[in-house]
């Protein structure tokens, strides 16, 4: 329970001709994490078809991204390699997707250019000017602009001698051709630059404006071309959608199968080889060595040599909790992967987190609402992502929140136990001292567990002096607490109090001397124990806010239906906000107490996560 999965390093030697079968077999069972052998032999290479698989995978993944995204609705039989490559090379839908996508891209670019040309031609259509000829004018400077109505810059240009402005209104803008002697170009631009937001320069040499016809007729022609371009783009989009609806699942399945074969093809790059044999090494769970041996022997028809290897390196770490509890493995690994040669803190983290979280939230209503919200988040998020795993932990945490809510008689801050339970519960406001004592005792218990873990880890690593320092810290915490309990509260006989004080001083000296570099942290045992009182601080804060919401906004029909509805809205909204704050603090503070106060007593971390050579079949069967 407190150990990571025991691991065994193995070596297998087999004929080169059996390599593909061995790789396929190991990929199916998914139990070995390959390591490059230290034997002084030649490094093996990826299997010969690696490049072709990679190219096809890139092609198929690209095609999948070009289709409208959807959820695959069908599973396909997994194909053998040769058949997969043959069918993938000849899948016409993929080539058509690329052709349609390229055509669609060209049409979109054409539509964009046509739209601009139409905008300019339409704006100047009232002038019936030949924009192509105007653009070729060499004797004068001629520029085209779109002005906002009543633009001061346009008025200034019209009033300037030597500058000709030919303008007409189109929609909300005024389109103008500004002609000037080239020597006056600076003057024109100074006027326009003084009002940049009011004037937009137009390119009358743009593509599709070169037609030798008047602007009004050009606008009509461009409108027709725009409609035609839009129709073609729509047809290409429609065809892509049709292919997606028919072939999306199939292409996605091919992507998965190609990923599987790519992993298999490159696996041999972790092997060593001789002229006729291949050698693989790796780590696997010790309890599955028999399964590994059977798979190799079956793939090679017994023409192999398998041997266990001494652990010449730190074994990878495998945390083996299943189902909903696997999210706690995710949380611990997110902080730092445990080393395989130290105690696994995950179970201790699970129990303490749930107790601390329930202690601080402790409301049946908040627990039920948070459970429903967390369940919804789990349904819409990726099971491998942080959002899903955080929501799963939050979902489990709702259970102790409900239990503590019943024990403390909290239902959205209202006491309801009297209506269906034989006890009223331990109410927060009447037992703050008791809750405070309970929080400190919880802290003391967890720190003692942490020091005990530290003793075991140090002793197993041969650091016996530091191990005994951890043991001295445990005894210091117990005797010191008894001394404080007797001295301040007169709860123990004087002699017992004095003996506890003397022993505490001896164990303090022992913890400092034996603890070595960690001895300086001995005094933190006091502050870390008291730090657990934050459980009460955040818990009572949530309770008092709930009480105030209930006092001010509990719905009642005595003031009429409208007021009742408003009170219901305010009551639910404020309790939801309080719930969110309470849940957030419950999660943050529970994790903080574990990471800062608990883990620092024993946890090294920095382990190597076990990554087996395996694959997950999502779309193939």
Image (spheres, helix red, strand yellow):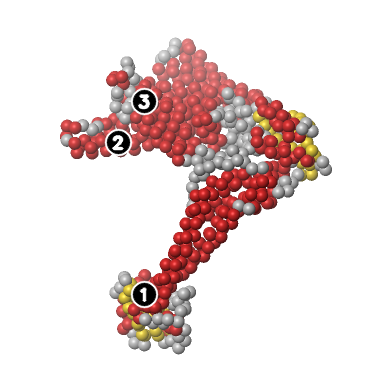
In this view, the residue in front, 331 or 384, is 384
Of callouts 1 and 2, which one flags the residue occurring earlier in the amino acid sequence? 1
Q: Distance between the residues labelled 1 and 3?
A: 71 Å
Q: Is 24 on the left-hand or right-hand side of 541? A: right
In this view, the residue in front, 288 or 162, is 288
Across and down, in percent, residue 211 comes to: 46, 79
Q: Residue 270 carries which label?
A: none
Q: What element carries label 3?
A: helix
Looking at the image, is mark 2 or mark 3 nearer the viewer?
A: 2
Q: Quadrant of residue 30?
A: top right
Of callouts 1 and 3, which one flags the residue occurring earlier in the amino acid sequence? 1
Q: Is mark 2 on a helix, strand or loop?
A: helix
Q: Distance between the residues labelled 1 and 2?
A: 56 Å
Across and down, in percent, residue 390 comes to: 47, 36
Q: Residue 572 carries which label?
A: 2
Instruction: Please give the residue where the numbered disc 1 appears in the rendered image.
Output: 123
Q: Which residue is drawn at 40% across and 17% down?
A: 489
Q: Residue at x 58, y 42 (%)?
A: 76
Across and down, in percent, residue 81 comes to: 67, 44
In this view, the residue in front, 216 or 351, is 216
User: Is label 1 in contact with label 3 (beta carbons under 8 Å)?
Assistant: no
Question: Does 587 appear above or below 218?
Answer: above
Residue located farthest toward the left when viewing the structure as drawn: 559
Q: Which image quarter is the C terminus in?
A: top right
Mark 3: few, some, or many residues within 10 Å (few <14, many ≥20)? many
Question: Does 270 appear above or below 291?
Answer: below
Question: Does 248 appear above or below 105?
Answer: above
Mark 1: few, some, or many residues within 10 Å (few <14, many ≥20)? many
Looking at the image, is mark 1 or mark 2 nearer the viewer?
A: 1
């Amino acid at each position: 329970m407190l150990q990571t999965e025991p691991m065994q390093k193995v070596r297998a030697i087999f004929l080169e001709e059996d390599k593909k079968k061995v790789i396929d077999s190991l990929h199916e069972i998914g139990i070995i994490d390959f390591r490059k052998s230290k034997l002084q032999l030649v490094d093996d290479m990826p299997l010969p078809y690696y490049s072709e698989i990679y190219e096809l995978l890139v092609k198929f993944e690209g095609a999948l991204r070009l289709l409208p995204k959807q959820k695959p609705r069908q599973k396909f039989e997994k194909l053998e390699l040769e058949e997969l490559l043959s069918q993938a090379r000849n899948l016409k839908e993929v080539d058509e997707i690329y052709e349609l996508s390229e055509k669609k891209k060209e049409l979109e670019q054409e539509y964009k250019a046509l739209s601009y040309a139409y905008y300019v031609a339409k704006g100047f259509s009232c002038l019936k000017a030949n924009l192509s000829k105007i653009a070729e004018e060499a004797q004068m400077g001629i520029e085209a602009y779109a002005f906002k109505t009543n633009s001061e810059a346009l008025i200034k240009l019209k009033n300037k001698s030597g500058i000709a402005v030919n303008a007409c209104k189109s929609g909300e803008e005024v389109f103008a051709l500004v002609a000037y002697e080239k020597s006056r170009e600076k003057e024109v631009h100074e006027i326009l630059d003084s009002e940049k937001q009011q004037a937009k320069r137009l390119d009358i040499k743009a593509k599709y404006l070169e037609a030798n016809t008047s602007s009004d007729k050009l606008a009509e022609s461009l409108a027709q071309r725009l409609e035609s371009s839009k129709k073609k783009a729509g047809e290409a989009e429609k065809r892509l959608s049709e292919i997606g609806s028919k072939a999306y699942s199939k292409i996605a399945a091919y992507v998965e199968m190609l990923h599987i074969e790519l992993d298999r093809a490159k696996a041999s790059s972790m092997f060593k080889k001789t002229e006729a044999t291949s050698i693989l090494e790796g780590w696997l769970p010790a309890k599955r060595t028999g399964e590994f041996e059977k798979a190799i022997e079956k793939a090679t028809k017994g023409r192999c040599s398998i041997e266990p290897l001494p652990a010449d390196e730190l074994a990878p770490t495998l945390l083996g909790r299943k189902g909903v509890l696997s999210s706690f493995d995710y949380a611990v690994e997110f902080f730092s992967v445990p080393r395989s040669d130290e105690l696994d803190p995950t179970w201790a983290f699970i129990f303490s987190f749930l107790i601390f979280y329930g202690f601080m939230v402790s409301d049946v209503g908040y627990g039920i609402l948070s459970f429903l919200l967390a369940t919804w988040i789990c349904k819409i998020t990726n099971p491998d992502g942080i959002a899903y795993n955080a929501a799963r932990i939050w979902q489990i945490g709702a259970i102790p929140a409900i239990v503590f809510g019943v024990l403390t008689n909290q239902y959205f801050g209202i006491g309801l136990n009297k209506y269906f339970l034989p006890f009223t519960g331990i109410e927060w406001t009447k037992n703050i001292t008791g809750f405070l004592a309970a929080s400190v005792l919880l802290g003391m218990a967890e720190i003692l567990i942490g020091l005990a873990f530290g003793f075991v880890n140090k002793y197993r690593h041969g650091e016996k002096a530091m191990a005994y320092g951890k043991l001295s810290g445990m005894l210091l915490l117990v005797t010191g607490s008894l001394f404080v309990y007797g001295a301040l509260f007169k709860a123990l006989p004087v002699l017992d109090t004095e003996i506890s004080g003397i022993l505490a001083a001896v164990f303090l000296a022992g913890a400092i001397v034996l603890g070595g570099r960690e001895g300086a942290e001995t005094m933190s045992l006091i502050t870390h124990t008291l730090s657990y009182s934050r459980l009460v601080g955040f818990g009572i804060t949530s309770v008092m806010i709930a009480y105030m919401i209930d006092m001010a906004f509990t719905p009642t029909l005595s003031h009429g239906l409208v007021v009742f509805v408003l009170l219901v809205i305010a009551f639910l909204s404020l309790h939801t906000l309080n719930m969110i704050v309470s849940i957030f603090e419950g999660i943050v503070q529970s994790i903080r107490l574990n990471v800062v106060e608990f883990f620092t007593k024993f946890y090294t971390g920095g382990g190597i996560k076990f990554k087996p050579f395996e694959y997950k079949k999502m779309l193939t069967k």
